[in-house]
Image: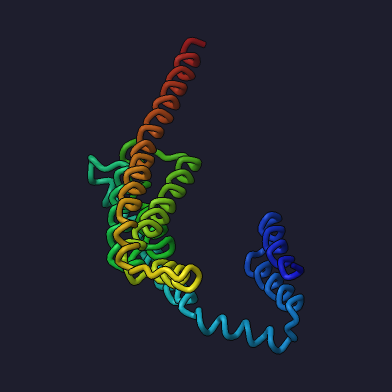
């Protein structure tokens, strides 16, 4: 049971907001030492883990490209484009992205979107541009709310969409686990088909939340306008 101390270290480290990389590394080393591994074996385990999962470092290649296109005005162009489309709102932009993200993930194209690749340079600026066109100005706390909904649209879309694809890692993990643990044979296609109703429900529920965002912003800006008018009237009276 001592090896579970590593889990406790992760929980405590995240709770006090330490650097996640440092927390996970220290927790891994402590767990390995308590498990009886020597320093050389620990180093070998870290090296094997990095080599088998090196694809996760691809973002280091993508980030400079995103930085360059943002430097040359990608976000501003996205805002300007959306500002010209009168019927689009922040919620409708995010709803469209949710649909695209879920459909592409369902056919295995999970790398098309993503926070770094799409949400930050494109989706959020487009949603913000729609809000600017509709309300004229967007306070900082509203921008943060739109950012959160933009990231959530990406998360929900890929999470519930990818399970419809039969060759995704989660489907293969489930079938392997059930086969080796419970000796039950499941076809990946069976799981993928059963994931379709869940994906549809996720789209409807989160789509409703995105459309409700527009109503919430309408109410907030209406209240702000009313308060400003009342303050202006009081000033004129004085």
Position of residue 106 relative to residue 143, above or below, is below
> Is residue 74 in view?
yes
> Is residue 63 in view?
no
Identify the residue shown where x is 32% and y is 57%: 194
Position of residue 150 relative to residue 191, above or below, is above
Q: Position of residue 94 (x, y in %)?
A: 34, 48
Nearer to us in this view, 80 or 146: 146
Counting every numbered tag in the picture gives 0
| Residue 204 found in image quarter | top left
Nearer to us in this view, 196 or 27: 196
Q: Position of residue 87 (x, y in %)?
A: 23, 40
Tell me: 123 left or right of 33: left
Tell me: 55 left or right of 95: right
Q: Residue furthest front?
A: 183
Identify the residue shown where x is 42% and y is 21%: 226
Q: Position of residue 106 (x, y in %)?
A: 30, 62
Q: How is the image coloured?
A: rainbow
Position of residue 57 relative to residue 88, above or below, is below
Nearer to us in this view, 234 or 22: 22
Position of residue 222 relative to residue 123, above or below, is above
Q: Position of residue 162 (x, y in %)?
A: 35, 63
Q: Quadrant of the N terminus?
A: bottom right
Identify the residue shown where x is 76% and y is 75%: 34
Q: Residue furthest top?
A: 237
């Amino acid at each position: 049971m001592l090896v579970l101390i590593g889990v406790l270290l992760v929980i405590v480290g995240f709770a006090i907001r330490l650097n996640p990389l440092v927390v996970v590394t220290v927790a891994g080393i402590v767990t390995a030492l308590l498990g009886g591994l020597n320093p050389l074996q620990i180093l070998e385990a870290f090296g094997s883990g990095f080599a088998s999962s090196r694809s996760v470092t691809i973002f280091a290649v993508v980030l400079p490209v995103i930085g360059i296109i943002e430097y040359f005005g990608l976000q501003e162009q996205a805002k300007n484009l959306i500002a010209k489309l009168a019927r689009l709102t922040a919620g409708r932009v995010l709803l469209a992205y949710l649909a695209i993200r879920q459909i592409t993930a369902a056919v295995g194209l999970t790398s098309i979107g993503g926070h770094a690749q799409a949400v930050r340079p494109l989706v959020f600026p487009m949603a913000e541009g729609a809000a600017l066109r509709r309300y004229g100005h967007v306070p900082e706390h509203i921008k943060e709310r739109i950012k959160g909904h933009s990231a959530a649209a990406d998360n929900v879309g890929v999470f519930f969409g990818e399970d419809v694809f039969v060759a995704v890692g989660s489907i293969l993990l489930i079938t392997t686990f059930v086969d080796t643990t419970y000796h039950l044979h499941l076809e990946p296609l069976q799981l993928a088909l059963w994931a379709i109703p869940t994906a549809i429900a996720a789209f409807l529920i989160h789509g409703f939340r995105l459309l409700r965002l527009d109503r919430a912003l309408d109410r907030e800006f209406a209240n702000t306008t009313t308060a400003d008018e009342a303050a202006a009237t009081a000033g004129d009276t004085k």
